[in-house]
Image (cartoon, helix red, strand yellow):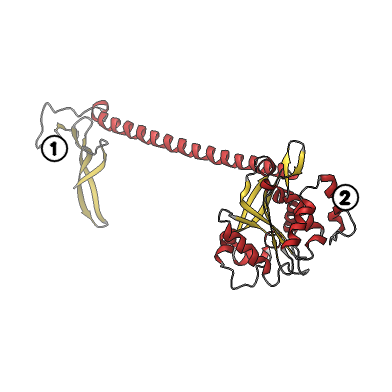
């Protein structure tokens, strides 16, 4: 039998082997070593000490065998392949690591930028120079997609059933006062609440708003307090906080946007409606607020219910030329009704 002991070279072209004679005895076959071939010396050693020289792969002994290749000669191609492979793999790993590092740096840079923008927004909202408002998509009202409803519900219900109707924008003092950047595409509606639970139970105000929007196709967003500010005693703490922030910055809407005044018979007796009407007839200047000339007024007065066009003209005459001090004095009068006295204060 021939027993191979181990591989002689890395490419497995040569090997050591032994010749064995297996003798049958009572307890089985017993191997007896007859001779061993060693590839390093290309020598075959018999067990009796007699040595013959063989050339591996050929028959019969030779006196001058061909020497086997040395490690530096036989393995040089293999080493080159390994070196090239390791180099290519290393380059690929380095490129992958560089890509991963680049992605992580950009990711954290983006997060840092967002955090900085959020901090700046919070600081500006705290000092009143900007505020985040919710609006209703004007196309929703124009298209009449709400017609299964007699009137639109409060903001919480609109968000729940039609979240795509609600749009959120940040308004700044610079754009509202100095650049008049919102007069073209944002409409703020000034109106009276007809009942404590709903400002427009029969949808008269909604219908008037839609008619105005159909005549002004450039308007993209509509602000109406009941639709755009969290309402009711069941507001979550975050909703109450948002409501207070918008209420404190409502002048951004009535001084910086186009205003639709829906005037009924009680409009001129209410604090908030008169304040909003006065704001809509003012314009910002370097010294503060001043009455806007007729061409620059941003308001449109629409009589509803039993109000007449003559009453609408009286509203304009009453507030169009009032200064800040005159407006403060009139609004502080006891015959100007307000639901929460703290609003006046």
Q: Secondary structure at mark 1?
A: loop
- View extreme (front): residue: 310
Choose mark 2 or mark 1, whichever is in front: 2
* Residue depicted at 76% across the width and 42% down the height: 289
Please state the total of marks drawn on the protein image.
Answer: 2
Disc number for residue 305: none
Q: Is residue 135 left or right of residue 53?
A: right
Residue 42: image location, x then y, percent:
19, 31
Q: Nearer the viewer, residue 275 or 126?
A: 275
Q: Is residue 271 left or right of residue 285?
A: right
202 in relation to 294, above or below: below
Q: Is residue 249 visible?
A: no
Within 10 angstroms of label 1, few (less than 14), some, or many (20 or more) residues? few
Residue 57: image location, x then y, percent:
13, 37
The residue where tag 2 is placed is 329
Disc number for residue 57: 1
* Residue depicted at 77% across the width and 36% down the height: 287
Q: Is residue 233 left or right of residue 87?
A: right
* Residue depicted at 80% across the width and 60% down the height: 268
Q: Is residue 218 left or right of residue 223?
A: left
Q: Nearer the viewer, residue 281 or 52?
A: 281
The image quadrant of residue 69 is top left
């Amino acid at each position: 039998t021939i027993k191979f002991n181990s591989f002689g070279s890395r490419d497995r072209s040569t090997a050591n082997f032994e010749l064995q004679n297996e003798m049958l005895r009572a307890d089985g076959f017993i191997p007896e070593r007859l001779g061993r071939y060693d590839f390093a010396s290309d020598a075959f050693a018999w067990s009796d000490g007699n040595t013959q020289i063989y050339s591996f792969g050929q028959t019969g002994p030779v006196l001058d065998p061909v020497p086997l290749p040395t490690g530096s000669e036989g393995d040089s191609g293999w080493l080159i392949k390994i070196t090239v492979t390791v180099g290519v793999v290393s380059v690929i790993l380095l490129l992958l690591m560089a890509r991963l590092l680049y992605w992580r740096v950009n990711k954290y840079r983006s997060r840092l930028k967002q955090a900085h923008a959020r901090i700046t927004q919070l600081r500006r909202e705290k000092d009143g120079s900007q505020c985040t408002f919710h609006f209703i998509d004007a196309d929703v009202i124009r298209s009449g997609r709400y017609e299964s409803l007699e009137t639109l519900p409060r903001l919480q219900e609109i968000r729940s059933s039609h979240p795509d109707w609600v749009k959120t924008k940040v308004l700044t003092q610079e754009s509202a006062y100095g650049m008049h950047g919102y007069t073209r595409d944002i409409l703020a509606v000034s109106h009276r609440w007809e009942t404590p639970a709903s400002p427009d139970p029969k949808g008269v105000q909604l219908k008037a708003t839609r008619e105005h929007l159909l005549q002004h196709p450039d308007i993209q967003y509509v602000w109406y307090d009941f639709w755009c500010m969290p309402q009711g005693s069941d507001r979550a703490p975050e909703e109450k906080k948002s409501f207070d922030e918008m209420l404190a910055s409502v002048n951004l809407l009535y001084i910086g946007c186009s205003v639709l005044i829906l005037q009924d018979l009680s409009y001129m007796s209410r604090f908030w409606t008169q304040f909003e009407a006065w704001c809509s007839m003012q314009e910002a200047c370097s010294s503060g607020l001043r009455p806007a000339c007729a061409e620059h007024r941003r308001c449109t007065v629409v009589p509803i219910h039993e109000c007449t066009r003559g009453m609408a003209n009286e509203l304009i005459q009453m507030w169009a030329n009032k200064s800040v001090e005159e407006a403060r004095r009139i609004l502080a009068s006891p015959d100007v009704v307000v639901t929460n006295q703290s609003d006046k204060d």
